[in-house]
Image: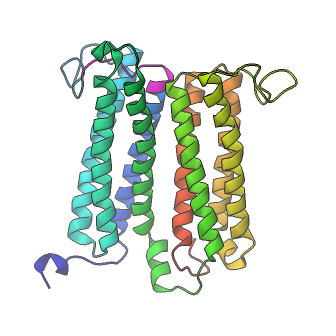
Amino acid sequence: MSLLSKHRTADYKPRLFVFCLFTLAWITLLLYAGGFTTSIKAGMAFLDWPLSNGSINPQGWLTQSDKLAEHSHRLLGMKIGLLSITLLVWTYLRESRKSVRTLAGLLVLVVVLQGLLGGARVRFDWLNTHAESNLIAQSFAVAHACGAQIVLGTLVAITIMSSKAWIRGNNQSIYQVPQSIHRWGTLACLGLFIQVLIGAIMRHADAGLAIIRFPLARPGSFLPAYWNFDVSIHFAHRVWAIGATALIIIFIGKIWVFPPARKSFRNAAVLVLFILAIQIYLGALTIWTIKNPYVATMHALIGAFLLASTWGLTLFTHRPMTQHTL
């Protein structure tokens, strides 16, 4: 046994778990800053990257709303990079479970990729390239939005696997969750990720108000009066919201009809449904307030929470559990 291995254990580490929660709090701020930057169309407040106007402390960024939003987003991204590196070193030195160390390494790689995607979104914008179309920059922006969900999901997985509930369930398992719950949980996560993708395309195409009514698209009809790309992607976001909602409800229903799972996961399942209800309301409110930037940003943020909580619950169902795990 190597000297390093002697210091690694699979035991519950309270300080590591708290640090994971601390990092999740910072990611929440980052997601809000990124969403708000998109909502007020401030993504190109600075034409350079990784510096902002050639500086890490550009003149006037605290007094101009677009520069404040974009530079705050960049600084928070750097903060998450440092936190993810710290988490990687911590798990490498103290964690004996290879799966957790691997996830910590993956987190750093995804965070770095996220930074590069954000930089590419700036560098390939038509304000820099003078191209006739901004499709390349928008594609990087959509990938950047989806990558944020992967960063969040990876950190959620590390946090859950570092929790006392996960480790205790590993040592005292008494039942296995039916495969049908696993399948529907995976489908719900996939459905939500597709919804995030559609929403990102819609937001970066500035199609959030392509249909200005809700729940009807026009008086007396759910269907739009005409079709173009903006209307189509907006309508797809509405339609797939119904599909994603159905997948979540079926997933929760599968948990509810299996008594041991209901007892273990009841609180988490109710939380997912609560976040779902808020998300539906915020989606409607985004239209009713003519896409108020704060409402639109909260809709994007709560959507990330919904995916993260559904993913966390799905992950937990893959671990043999005691009756009192959650």
| Residue in view at x 60 percent, y 78 percent | 324
Q: Is residue 47 left or right of residue 146?
A: left
Q: Position of residue 192 (x, y in %)?
A: 58, 48
| Residue in view at x 35 percent, y 78 percent | 11
Q: Is residue 80 visible?
A: no
Q: Tell me: residue 3, above or below residue 286.
A: below
Q: Quadrant of the N terminus?
A: bottom left
From which residue to which does the magenta span run?
A: 37-48
Q: Tell me: residue 128, above or below residue 311.
A: above
Front position in the image: 135 or 186? 135
The image quadrant that residue 34 belongs to is: top left
Q: Is residue 126 left or right of residue 324?
A: left
Instruction: State yes or no: residue 165 in magenta.
Output: no
| Residue in view at x 55 percent, y 50 percent | 307
How is this picture coloured? rainbow
Q: Is residue 189 visible?
A: yes
Q: How many marks?
A: 0
Secondary structure that dominates the magenta span: loop
Front position in the image: 281 or 315? 315
Front position in the image: 132 or 68? 132
Q: Position of residue 189 (x, y in %)?
A: 56, 55
Q: Position of residue 46 (x, y in %)?
A: 30, 18
